[in-house]
Image (cartoon, rainbow, N blue to C red):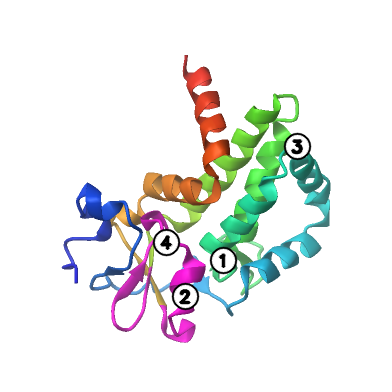
Amino acid sequence: MLSPDRAAGDQDAGERNAPGRDRVSPPEAVTAPRISLGAPAAPADTLRRFRLSQADLMPTVRRLELDWPCSVAMMQRLAEYVTGIPLHHPCRPGLRTGSSTPVLFLCLQKGLGAYDAASDASDDRRLLAFIDGLCGEAARLLSGIALFTPDNDCWMAGNGMALHGWLASCDTHSVTVHRSQRRGASHQRVVDAVGRYVVMARERAILDRVRLAGAI
């Protein structure tokens, strides 16, 4: 078991390569969470609900899937990684009490919006915009957040384990949301972990070349 001062993100390189459970003592529970947990649902069901509720984005989804058929699998993998359970509660005036949106929906909205905005770019740069958009949104929403079970089993989005798999062995009703400054909850760790999980090896190599070309 890890000590409270040694999170999974602080393990040596050999341990980091295998996503695993992080058993640490939780910090204080979030008293006014921007993230909470909803009723569990299968990733495929959550994706279906997204498609049914986001009719205005469906033309962009169809273009993306036509340009990059692999994007179907990418969206499925994103749904496994963040699921539809973490709910984001925006803190903006004028919103009704209890208004919330699954983190998955917000990530897809951001990625699809970026893909649409890059419509004049090449196919590979549009895909990069999509991936960077959804990974950045996942990090914006989930960095600084950790989920804990009563026995201190911990999930952080930057540790490389899909939330769907982690929750499969948990009593969802007993999981609590906490703020965390551990490395596994850092912004860049979340960006990297989501990208590694969502993007397959072939497309990752393509996007790496696009990034390299853009940096030259």
For the residue carrying disc 4, how many other residues have a C-alpha within 10 Å: few (<14), some (14-19), or many (20+)?
many
Marks 3 and 2, Cα distance to the nearest angstrom?
33 Å
Question: x, y percentage for residue 81?
Answer: 52, 60
Contact? badges 2 and 1 (CB < 8 Å)? yes
Left or right of 13 in this view: 203 = right
Q: Amino acid at mark 4?
A: Met
- Residue positioned most to the front: 202
- What is the secondary structure assignment of the residue under circle 1? loop
State which tag comes first along the sequence, 1 or 3: 3
Residue 35, visible in the rendered structure: no
Q: Nearer the viewer, residue 192 or 209?
A: 209
Q: Amino acid at mark 1?
A: Thr
Could you tell me which residue is drawn at 74 percent across and 65 percent down? 48
- What is the secondary structure assignment of the residue under circle 3? helix
Q: Nearer the viewer, mark 1 or mark 3?
A: 3
The relative height of residue 111 versus residue 94 in the rendered view (above or below) is: above
Contact? badges 4 and 3 (CB < 8 Å)? no
Marks 4 and 2, Cα distance to the nearest angstrom?
10 Å
Q: Amino acid at mark 2?
A: Leu
State which tag comes first along the sequence, 3 or 2: 3
The circle on residue 67 is 3
For the residue carrying disc 1, how many other residues have a C-alpha within 10 Å: few (<14), some (14-19), or many (20+)?
many
